[in-house]
Amino acid sequence: RTTTAPGGFTGAEAIVFTGDTLFKNSVGGVKAPGHTTYTDLRDSIMGTLMELPPDTVIYPGHAEQTTVRREWEDNSFIRVWRGLDAEGAERCTALGEPATLILLGADYDGGTKAWVRWPDGSDDIVPGSKIERTS
């Protein structure tokens, strides 16, 4: 973690490295080994990253850089979390289990990322390639 150190040169560009948490137009998954939970991911993005100044440059762990402003306005996951776009309600199979497809969005590699809700009410972000649409 780094922070500003007033007393030096002003007007420097603000940057943040997000690893596998936030990508340009997408978010990280939560089902690979070593990942934490959907709630951790959402809270990190909405409660930490999206609280940074809008012109902060985001360097994700993969693919192109972006800015807080661009993700706030264009990232489909963030738009739903903000209440700008509605959650989906399509029945699907995710990772071989019944689920509800809340959102199928773009991923950094040209594929898709899926936000699913399980029958117990918990949520996950999984690779879109692991979704079978059933309705």
Image (tube, rainbow, N blue to C red):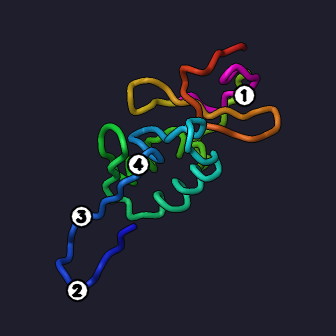
Q: Outermost residue, bottom direction?
A: 7
Q: Which residue is mark 1?
A: 100
N-terminal label among 4 and 3: 3
Residue 114: % across, % down: 58, 30
Residue 101: % across, % down: 67, 28
Q: Which residue is mark 2?
A: 7
What amino acid is at disc 4?
Answer: Gly
What amino acid is at disc 2?
Answer: Gly
Q: Which residue is mark 3?
A: 13
Q: Is residue 12 magenta?
A: no
User: Who's the residue at 32% across and 49% down the image?
Assistant: 59
Residue range in magenta is 92-104
Q: Nearer the viewer, residue 71 or 129?
A: 129
Q: Outermost residue, right direction?
A: 120
Residue 55: % across, % down: 32, 59
Q: Secondary structure at mark 3?
A: loop
Residue 19 is tagged as 4
